[in-house]
Amino acid sequence: MKQDRSKKKTTSPRPRPGRPRADQAGEVERRILDAATAIFLEQGFGRASLDNVAERAHVGKTTLYSRYATKEALFEAVVRECVETFLQDMDAGHARGTLEEKLVQVGSALAQATLTPYVISIMRITLAETDRFPEIAKEAFRLGFGACIQSIADALLTGEEPLEAGHALEVGRRFVELTLHPLYFHAFFGDDLGLLNKRIAKDVAQVARMLAGDIETSNLDDPV
């Protein structure tokens, strides 16, 4: 008996494209941020484009634009991740001891976590684009600078010789400006990061001693 060939072969319908499943969303986001970080580091903020990010991340433009409508929003996300990364990389534990000892512990950990090629490169991008994109530079500085200050202040709020919150923030600001910023400045101009990391212990100890002495003599009693 001949087979009836008149019947059409049935196939299951193709799934319609749409939003990624919940279990895929994190993986898509990871690809986007990884691609964006690589492109920003290679091309700077000005020359980078969302289309290039979508292509490298292997995602549709609609998927990318639904998450980040502008290049500025995407760069802010990259900077936020940079800040989260160096805060996670800090190995200060729970700072203990006198105020000076706590400053040394958390300050050393913060310096080591930020004096890395990745963090310094992100800082360079924001500096390079300050004239054309001042708001981007301001926001990146606010995020990074604020996170550094807060990490110092948090260590000074508890344990021995705790400080009042406003006072702790002022000490944190002074510490970052006097210890970290000079090291970053040298890094921006190409000084070897290995040598700069070797300076951390000495520089941190000197500033911690000075700030602790200022507090004892009440020179920092009135936060600015």
Image (spheres, rainbow, N blue to C red):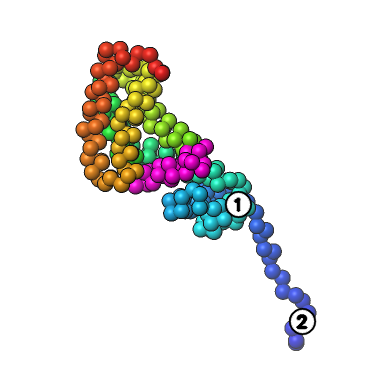
Q: Is residue 222 left or right of residue 213?
A: right
**Label 2 amino acid?**
Asp
Q: Is residue 54 visible to us here?
A: no
Tell me which numbered mark, 1 or 2, is placed earlier along the sequence.
Answer: 2
Please name the amino acid that badge 1 sits on: Thr
Location of the N terminus by quadrant is: bottom right
Quadrant showing the C terminus: top left
Residue carrying label 1: 63
Asked if the stretch drawn in magenta spans residue 76, the answer is: no
**Is residue 204 found left or right of 157 in the rendered image?**
left
Secondary structure at badge 2 equals: loop
Q: CA distance from mark 1 to mark 2?
A: 46 Å
In this orientation, which residue lies closer to the viewer: 121 or 25?
121
Residue 208, label in figure: none
Provide residue 19's location: percent of width, then percent of height. 63, 51
Classified by dominant secondary structure, the portion drawn in magenta counts as helix
Highlighted magenta segment, given as a residue range: 117-137
Q: Residue at x 47, y 40 (%)?
A: 130
The disc label shown at residue 4, or none: 2
**Image point 62% across, 47% down: which residue?**
66
Q: Is residue 125 magenta?
A: yes
Give the quarter of the image for residue 213: top left
Badge 2: few (under 14), some or many (20 or more) residues near its Cα, within 10 Å?
few
Viewer-closest of 122 and 86: 122
* Image position of 84 with respect to 7: above or below: above
Residue 25: x %, y % from top left: 55, 49
Q: Residue at x 26, y 19 (%)?
A: 212
